[in-house]
Amino acid sequence: MRAAFMYEAGDLRVLDAPDPVIEQPTDAVVRILRSCVCGTDLHPYHSMTTDEAPRAMGHEFIGVVEELGSEVSGFRRGDLVVSPFFFADNTCEYCRAGLHTACPNGGWYSADGMGGAQAEAVRVPQAQGTLVRLPADADDALLSSLLTLADVYGTGYHAAKQAGVRPGDAVTVIGDGAVGLLAVLSARQLGAERIILMGRHKDRTDIGRLFGATDVVPERGEEGIAMVRELTGGHGTRAVLEAVGHLPAYEMAVGAVRAGGVISRVGVPQYEQAPIGFDSLFGANVTLTGGPAPVRAYIDALLPGVLEGTVDPGRVFDRTLSLEETPEGYRAMDRREALKVMITL
């Protein structure tokens, strides 16, 4: 099969690779129909060294079941399925608590020797607990929105849920990437009345307004914080959803949250140290939460809205490329020429 591999920062190649096979009775092999490039993929694209190479890339996909291990029930060959970016058994105490990313039998695609989803096929461990069956007659337009259930929609929703967004809330969303925009959509779904989107790319913030943003703040840093506070009577918002992962975004979140509020981070942090002391969080009784989204916990709740057409999260895809063109997809997203690239197979 063909698959994408990272060899070092900026060096992504689509190469021949062995076809995936069943290795454990709990596995499935899925032929991929749709995959995509994630903002998280850009981190190794910027910083990966040759001693980590080659690394299979991609963790979001929709596909068709081709093989099933002997212990996998509830699926048949030919089923259309979506997979969360983290596979899990869906039966352990963590999964039952909705924290699938802590599953002791789980793991990440594209890590620890696992295959990636920017490929023609992939092995899915813990397939029975991981995969979710989709309608077999889903058309191309619907597939785009269904693909967001693999990561970005569930991650945006996780940001809002962890912050406890509730009807009437005022929320600030930091970041106009796909996750930030779907955090806007999710905050609106949970009843937020005012949603301030901090982003400076008009083509993206226009989607944010469509998803429910009431205000857009393009300024960054102290100037951006001042604008959020001006919009909120000097107080800031009770919930701040940080969907970037860089320290300046966290610092804006600290500045934009009101006393007694919540900062919910879902942008994978590219830093280890950040202000949490008296002058930042402690003195104002601010809660810091977030983390990698247990997407499997949210798919069943989010799927009906996608199927009914009441939400259209697939709008975040603004470029479609073939698997062989995946390196161009990385370049386009890195240069901010594309919001999110979908890969068709």
Image (cartoon, rainbow, N blue to C red):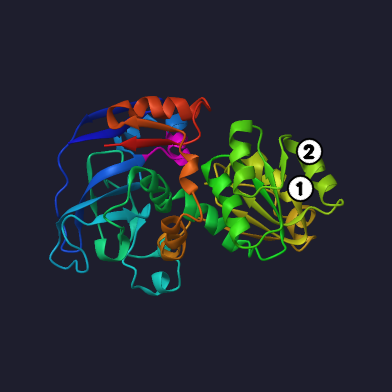
- In the picture, the disc for residue 222 is 2
Q: Residue 245: where, in percent of width, then height?
A: 57, 43
Query: For the point 15% across and 63% down, which residue is it?
Result: 25
What secondary structure is found at the residue carrying circle 2?
helix
Q: Residue 133: where, in percent of width, then height?
A: 29, 60
Quadrant of the rendered image containing residue 297: bottom left
Q: Which residue is mark 1?
A: 255
Q: Is residue 235 magenta?
A: no
Quadrant of the rendered image containing residue 106: bottom left
Query: For the point 59% across and 36% down, which residue is it?
Result: 204
Q: Residue 88: where, in percent of width, then height?
A: 33, 62
C-alpha distance separating marks 2 and 1: 8 Å
Q: Residues within 10 Å of mark 1 (few under 14, many from 20)?
A: many
| Residue 194 falls left or right of residue 62 | right
Q: Main secondary structure of the magenta part?
A: helix
Quadrant of the rendered image containing residue 208: top right
Q: Quadrant of the C terminus?
A: top left
